[in-house]
Amino acid sequence: MCVGCRQRAQAAELVRVVAQQREDATVLVADPAKTMPGRGAWLHARAECISVATRRRAFAAALRTPGLTADPDDLAEQLGVITH
Ligand SMILES: [Zn+2]
């Protein structure tokens, strides 16, 4: 299921992102190979889904990381999504 639009989709249609601990923050990192360890969140590589998921704080909930910093522009860039 996409954490943005919440529609069911096959894994092949979605991209995986994981939370990664950095020195000063927990950030979202795209996992294009879908092999990174830990809990993953799945979404469409679409600007709307990134935007909605960020607004709803869906990444923090899906990844069970309340302190997660989700930057939609950064994520869009990582996923190669054009937002402008
Ligand atoms: Zn979606």
Image: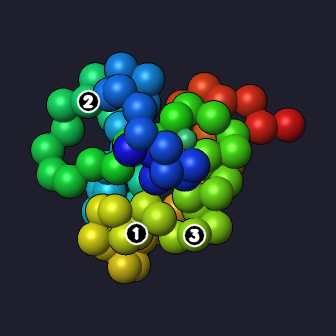
Task: Name the quadrant containing residue 64.
Answer: bottom left
| Residue sticking out furthest to the front | 8
C-alpha gap between disc 3 and disc 1? 9 Å
Closer to us: mark 2 or mark 3? 3
- Residue 48, percent across and down? 69, 45
Q: Is residue 68 left or right of residue 39?
A: right
Residue at screen point 69% across, 40% down: 47
- Does the residue at mark 3 contact the one at mark 1 (Cβ under 8 Å)? no
Q: Which numbered marker is on residue 23? A: none
Secondary structure beneath dot 1 equals helix
Total marks drawn?
3
- Residue 81, percent across and down? 65, 30
Secondary structure beneath dot 3 equals loop
Q: Which residue is mark 2?
A: 34
Quarter that holds the C terminus: top right
Please tell me how crowded label 2 is: few (under 14), some (14-19), or many (20+) other residues with Cα within 10 Å.
Answer: some
Residue at screen point 38% across, 44% down: 1
Closer to us: mark 3 or mark 1? 3
Residue at screen point 20% across, 53% down: 39
Q: Amino acid at mark 1?
A: Ala
C-alpha gap between disc 1 and disc 2? 18 Å
Q: Earlier in the sequence, mark 2 or mark 3?
A: 2
Secondary structure beneath dot 2 equals loop
Q: Which residue is mark 3?
A: 56
Q: Taking the image as drawn, is residue 74 in sight?
A: no
Q: Which residue is mark 1?
A: 60
Q: Amino acid at mark 3?
A: Arg
Q: Is residue 46 left or right of residue 38?
A: right
